[in-house]
Amino acid sequence: MIAGKQEPLLGRTPYYVLTGGLAIIFLFPLVWSFYASVSPQAGTAQSKGFGWGNYQTMFDFGAGLPTVAANSAVISILTVAITLAVSTLGGYAFARFKFWGKDALFLLTLSILMVPYATLLIPLYVLLNAVGLSNSLVGVALMIAMFQLPFATYMMRISFEAIPRELEESAQIDGCNSFGVLWRIMLPSVTPGLVTVGLFAFLAAWNDFFAPLILLTDPTKQPLPVTVANLRQQTMGVINYGATEAGVVVMALPCIILFLLLQRYYVRGFMSGAVKG
Amino acid sequence: MVTTTSISEATPAERPVRRARINLRRQLTGFAYTIPTLVFIVVFFLTPLVLVAKMSLSKYGLLTGDEGINFPRNYVSIWRNPLFWPSVWFTVQYTVLVTVMLLGLGLGLALLVQTVTRWSAFLRTVFLLPVSLGLAAASLLAYGFYSPAIGPISPPLEALGLIDNPIAFLGTSLAALLSTTFLVVWKFAGFYMLVLTVGLQGIPDDVHEAAALDGASSWQNFLHITLPLLRPSLSLATILCVTGSLLAFDQFFILTKGAPDNTTVTAVQVIYREAFQRQNLGTAAALSILVLIVLVLINILQFRFLRGTERD
């Protein structure tokens, strides 16, 4: 039942009781946060009966939800676009070309993983100020995209390596240059890799807290996570839990929907990583 | 092969020259595709690394900027920072706790969802849902979940008469550590389940069958076949988990803010406080360099250790 053809570790009933219980534990906080956001709470905009009062509070807070959500969207879309562009070109080069310094550059890209966020954010705060990108959503997106590069470049490299060489060779005979080959022949074959990289980049950018906290000091530039974190202490030390949970729902919903739609790409991303070790 | 067919038409003397030229062009083309990556690495990775190293050697205020070299004052002041050693100790405790729990639960979940049934697929989705949430969002969710005001755990227990007052999930240092660990385990367990599922699927069925034929019980099978063959995935999971936990920030910044009495401050939080509350970028940079060195050393040690044991 549990481990394929082996003798099962658990009987049928204990298996369903255990896994069912675990499923409830994992789902409960998510369901609860939605319930808490619409249920009546003393001291919030939703003090009597169920309704969307907390969402109204959340909507009106700070620069207003349209601005804040737009900030989050701009950071996320830019991050996804930059990550996809840089890692596709890089991955193609690493998979299909031989050139001086290739292995060193690839290792250098992977070594980004070893460096703590905080170590780079302090000098980047100074650096972005110096080049006039302080309080810039572009600066934040570039920063998050950089931290996506190790995974994205690795992912795109193995995606390109998996394409049979005959495909591009026949295109080259037909007179395609290398960019034509990449654009017309290779890209359609690496769509799963692109979706995986894009999904990871989106989730990372939409949810990032530390980079905007440090790089954006202008409240009208803040994305959702920082805004909702600030929303808690709005009224003289009294914490508005209802509006906070409404903020959590607003932040989580796009991620959950996107994840459910693209789940198989997310899982496949890990699988292809495993094949290559 | 395109290159060989075109080269075969050239005279023998021309061949090496032409091949070298084609080769050089191909090298340049390949290099050109990596220029965006290279620019990113130089501008956003190497330059900040050099800059943070230089800042760590200088008197550098948040508002005043660079005021010249003062080495080794920033590094010396780390040792005098009263928050430093407690934060190191707290970060280590947190890392060990989270790593043990996440790897254990991740492996357990991976074993539970191995079958190809609809129920398994449903479970996998459920366990992965919190992974898609951001750490900040999950921490804010937990902020309400653990609060005495709206938390859902205490009211039913109070109604049953099991407790008199709401449980103070963040009241003591230990409670805060355990509550935060629970949050992080809930959020990341699905991720480690996935990493370890991939490892489990890499183990061929016939190895298990052979062991079963030899009379191994399923427990023996797990202990002597599954675990050793799972070592590469377990190593990867350990490295990811240890690195991530040592750099913990969001969850404590949102959930505890160091409370009670600065007993739940992590290493990265000390960097943040140095930089933006005490406005001393120099000491914050020195701390960052220290964290970087420790992290690189730990990763090298982990690689050595995990690779060394693989040969057994």
Image: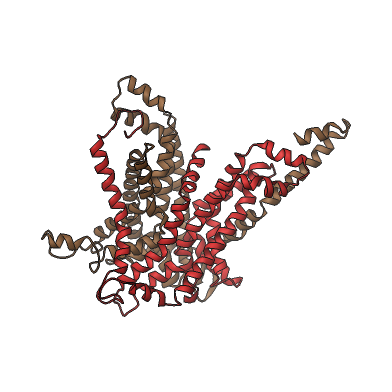
Viewed as shown, does residue B241 lie left or right of A87? left
Q: Which chain is brown?
A: B
| Residue nearest the observer in this picture, A186 or B67 | A186
Q: Give how far across and how far down residue A5 sits, in percent.
A: 35, 28
Residue farthest toward the left in the current orientation of the protein:
B161
Name the foreground residue: B221 vs B71. Answer: B221
Nearest the viewer among A116 and A193 is A193
- What residue lies at 26% left-to-right and 43% top-to-bottom? A18
Percent x, y of residue B306: 43, 38
Using the image, determine if residue A70 lies above or below residue A169. below
* Residue B283 in picture, x, y percent from top left: 46, 66
Q: Residue furthest top?
A: B214
The answer to whether residue A177 is above or below residue A120 is above
> Is there any visible trace of residue A261 in the rendered image?
yes
| Chain coloured red in this rendering | A
Residue depicted at x 63% and y 50% = A90
Q: Quadrant of residue B138?
A: bottom left
The answer, for residue B245, to whether it is visible in the render is no
Residue B277 picture quarter: bottom left
Quadrant position of the N terminus of chain A in the picture? top left
Looking at the image, residue A96 lies above or below residue B9: below
